[in-house]
Amino acid sequence: MTTRHFDHPGLLYHDADGFLSATLPFVRSAIRAGEPVLAALPGHNLGLLRRALGADAGRVDFADMTVTGRNPGRIIPGLLLRYAAAHPGKRVSFVGEPVWPGRTSVEYPACAAHEALINTVFEGRDATFLCPYDATQLTSSAIADAWRTHPVMIDHGVRVSSPSYGDPVTTAGDFNVPLPPPPASAEVLAYRRMPDLAGVRALVRRRAGPLLPRERLEEMVLAAHELAANTLRHTTGPGRLAVWTEPGLFACQVDDSGHITDPLAGRVPPHPLLSSGRGLLLVNQICDLVRIHTGPAGTSIRTHALT
Amino acid sequence: MSGLPLLDQVTLGDHICWTVDDDAIRMEAIAGFVRAGLRDHHRVLYCGDDPDDVLEGLRRHGVDTRTALGTGDLNATTAEASYLACGSFDPVATVDIWHTAVTTARAAGYRGIRVVGDMTWASRRVPGVEHLPSYEADINHLVFADGFVAGVCAYDRRHFDPLHLRRLLWAHPGAAGSEMPFDPASSLRVRRVRRPWGLRVAGEADLSNRDALRAVVEHIFDDHSEVTVDVSGLRFADIAAARVLVDVAASGAGRLRLTGCSPNLLRLLDFHGAGSVGALTVETR
């Protein structure tokens, strides 16, 4: 295949053989064409594909999706666009599995929105994405969402165009859903003026300090700071910071009266000469999850750091 | 009275935006600041409205103003005799006033100068007042970086538009309020270093002091084209602060060496493409 186009099939696999029977030829075809190929998969499938490739594995780039793509908001800017930029002028191929059975209900809407927005970001680019979905373990609604976010689907070896695929920005908007409220144990701080930002940082330092290694702590302090600074930059009203812990993670949420109207905010780097618009991109890069619920009534952004 | 030690941590080289809205708290804090200056053999200057009232207030707070005025340790003057000596606000002439004050204080053997600038004059329709934000940013490198002058700019919240006040705040490395003491840990401290030529930057660099940092950094190549900035004391820097550092190195005006970078600052510098800026050298802590 030498035509220049964007292709984004979803792959429904029912077992390891089904997974390999589609991903292996896809990767081998890219290798034969001398094209760069990146496989970003959860550890189990990563190992499966690597072993099946044998000697060819050396010609493929691998990433553990549960690490690199832990935060779905980071996959487009931190993995896909970066990989494409590293291979200018070449057709790039990806095997990407951002939705795996262990994803929580808080993480999931960010994953589905990510799958939809790949179509927007890569439209017209010379790139192919094969997105495997575990059809036996994922919920039926997750499989239905795969049909909505992929223009074509591959099931039992048959490639069909998806009848439920729609405008990707509209579809992504359907996953712009309210977050569950922070628990009663959350510590809350209102901020309204710039000197209050020091208090935002101090609260995160104090609450996350015992949970995170020093470097990781300072990253989360930075993430909370940038979110709160965005409130002061882009809104007139005050903001509210809430921090709490859940088993295995430190959570931090910023609520304000702003409305993020750009569906790609934080997923695509702004023009290099623009001085602003990088805060959310950085927060996506740092955090293990970034969930955004935004509308005319206000914005909530929740971040997780795994502990 | 609050009794909060609002200005106790201000040291020579600091430049504070102090937003006040309570006259009693204001007087008490000024008295503490003046007392500490007289104790440390600093020359203490008050410039602003109603200097006689301030002197009276200092007396009530136990400052021996008569002796201090007699020796020249203390001087209180109106805005019209300082900031507005030309009949309008002229930033260049005002900087000259500070440079002259530094020269005479050094010659007289003082260890430093403490200034309380009551900025209420700037809420009036004074010609030239539009230059105030850039003046406040520029004096960080023109006056304060040498570490001989401590300045507290008192802005009365009751006289200033909040948005204007916010812009003025950005130009100051540090801030204090009526109930918020100046905290050096969360403020920016910038001091000139002569060997190797450059700056030592400490504290926290964020949106609240961004213009102050930018003003200082944008002038680092004025005197030398090889500059070292020691950021080992910089506990926090936000995305905008890192951008300021990368931009100045990319300007082509000189070579910038950053020493003592934290892992977070490295990440931010990298985020802004520091790796492709040949004139920027980065060293870790």
Image (tube, helix red, strand yellow):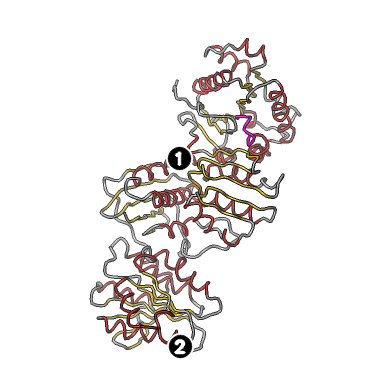
Q: Amino acid at mark 2?
A: Arg
Whether residue B192 is in magenta: the answer is: no
Are there few (<14), some (14-19), or many (20+) residues within 10 Å of tag 1? Answer: some
Amino acid found under the numbered disc labelled 1: Asp
B90 lies left or right of B159: right
Chain identifier of the residue bearing label 1 in the image: A
- Badges 2 and 1: C-beta atoms under 8 Å apart? no
Magenta residues span: B144-150
Report in which chain the residue with disc 2 lies: A
Q: Secondary structure at mark 1?
A: helix
Q: Position of residue B30 (x, y in %)?
A: 55, 22
The quarter of the image holding the C terminus of chain A is bottom left
From the viewer's perspective, is A249 left or right of B7?
A: left
Q: Is residue A291 visible?
A: no
Q: Is residue A176 left or right of residue B198?
A: left
Instruction: Please determine whether, in this image, residue A230 is positioned above or below residue A133.
Output: above
Is residue A54 found left or right of B147 in the rendered image? left
| Residue A187 x %, y % | 32, 43
The correct choice, above or below, for B76 with respect to A123 in the image is above
Q: Position of residue A302 (x, y in %)?
A: 36, 55
Magenta stretch containing residue B149, yes or no?
A: yes
Give residue A196's mark: 1
Q: Quadrant of residue B70?
A: top right
Q: Would you name the residue on which mark 2 appears?
A: A32
Q: CA distance from mark 2 to mark 1?
A: 57 Å
Please report whichever mark, 2 or 1, sits nearer to the chain's N-terminal start: 2
